[in-house]
Image (cartoon, rainbow, N blue to C red):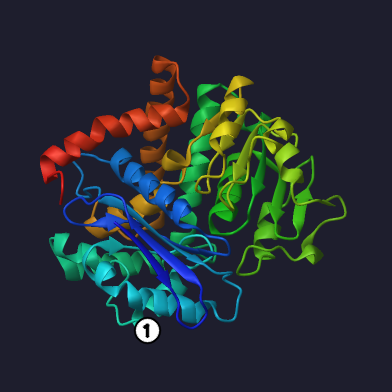
Amino acid sequence: MSITWTDHVTGRQGFLVVDRLVRGVASGGLRMRAGCTLDEVIGLARGMTMKEALHYDPQGRYIPLGGAKGGIDCDPRDPAAYGVLVRFLRAVRPTVENVWTTGEDLGLTQDLVDRAAAEAGLVSSIQAVYPLLDDETAARRRLADAFAVEVDGIGLDELVGGCGVAESALAALDRAQLPYREARVAVQGLGTMGGATARFLSRAGLAVVAVADVKGTIANPDGLDVEALLAARDAYGTVDRAALRPSDAELPGDAWLSAEAEVLVPAAVSYAIDAANQEAVTARWIVEAANMPVLPEAEEALAARGVTVLPDVVVNSGTNAWWWWTLFGDIGPDAEQAFAYTRRAMRTLVDRTLTRAETDGTTPRAAAHALVADRLPVIAERFGWYR
């Protein structure tokens, strides 16, 4: 199902795509960025179907949903953006009430989505899943309590996705037997996902040597002070340059791509690495924290020269899974439990994906697709093909 909506006030367009239903429900975030297209949202919705299927555990309380996605073609910094968001949610309200569970994505925070959803007359942005819960009151309280948890002043919901991305990178390093202290990382984007990923990798012992935001790239071959940079961010992940040390360099925005690092983490926008600029990559691994940051022709060229791309459908699936692990009761509203469960699940998934890639002689993305192809019929047989 595909919906294209045009705002009668601003002329901005919004898109909603439901790729697949499981038990009548689909899951996927809502993004807002200038230039967002229907084709982009279609690809993201398909990716959500894959992320859900990859986390299927027949023994778990969380049963994966179908995949969906929403997108609005508007700069989130535009003064008119909030009104567009409210009107979009009001327009697709019946879908949110009955089919589509959504939340924050690129350009939007969960607080903003929640506020706009309430103004649009919705009970919650995830209310479509409530009929599937054994005890709705307890489940909603558990998720609310989890969102209230903070670690070092940062909400658990803003950290768990980066924990999953970092663990994915660490799993790859471990398979290659590369000590963490010998690995360097460059991160594009220091927002929710990129910032948390940088924090977890830095605390694991890796040197974060470059980070990029809208103002450019901040670099230091000896390693950046990640905690200081995170403390100096604004709401959009832009770092106040006054927090830089004398040894930190300010470089052009694309300098993160060619940084001397073993691991690259694109954690900002889609389509960041294309057939042309992939030639600048010297890293051994690209870990896709953002959705669809590496174009197919770029990935083909990277694979030909030995660069492994860990795909978004695996790497950044932890945030979505955490919501449902918590809501369905696989874990409680506790940070250490959430991090431990996320690390275990992501490491298992990455190892399974890389093993399949080695066995089949394919890329990790092709291996992830193969795992999904194996699991979707199993899920469909249990819950139905068309509902």
SS category of the residue bearing label 1: helix
Determine the residue positioned at 70% across, 36% down: 276
The answer to whether 50 is drawn above or below residue 387 in the figure is above
Determine whether, in the image, residue 99 is placed left or right of residue 106: left
Q: Is 119 situated left or right of 287 in this image?
A: left
Q: Amino acid at mark 1?
A: Glu
- The answer, for residue 135, to whether it is visible in the render is yes
Q: Position of residue 374 (x, y in %)?
A: 26, 29
Q: Which residue is mark 1?
A: 119
Extreme-right residue of the structure: 246
Residue 207 lies left or right of residue 2; in this view the side is right
Dot 1, crowdedness within 10 Å: few (<14), some or many (≥20)?
Answer: some
Q: Residue at x 70, y 52 (%)?
A: 212
Residue 44 in percent (x, y) is at 42, 50
Q: Nearer the viewer, residue 374 or 347?
A: 374
- Residue beneath the point at 31% across and 34% down: 372
Q: Position of residue 47 (x, y in %)?
A: 39, 45
How many numbered circles does the render carry? 1
- Residue at x 70% of width, y 38% of height: 277
Q: Nearer the viewer, residue 39 or 98?
A: 39
Q: Is residue 58 visible?
A: no
- Image location (x, y in percent) of residue 363: 48, 25
Vertical placement of residue 356 versus 266, above or below? above
Quadrant of the snapshot with the N terminus? bottom left
Is 303 positioned to the left or the right of 90 in the image?
A: right
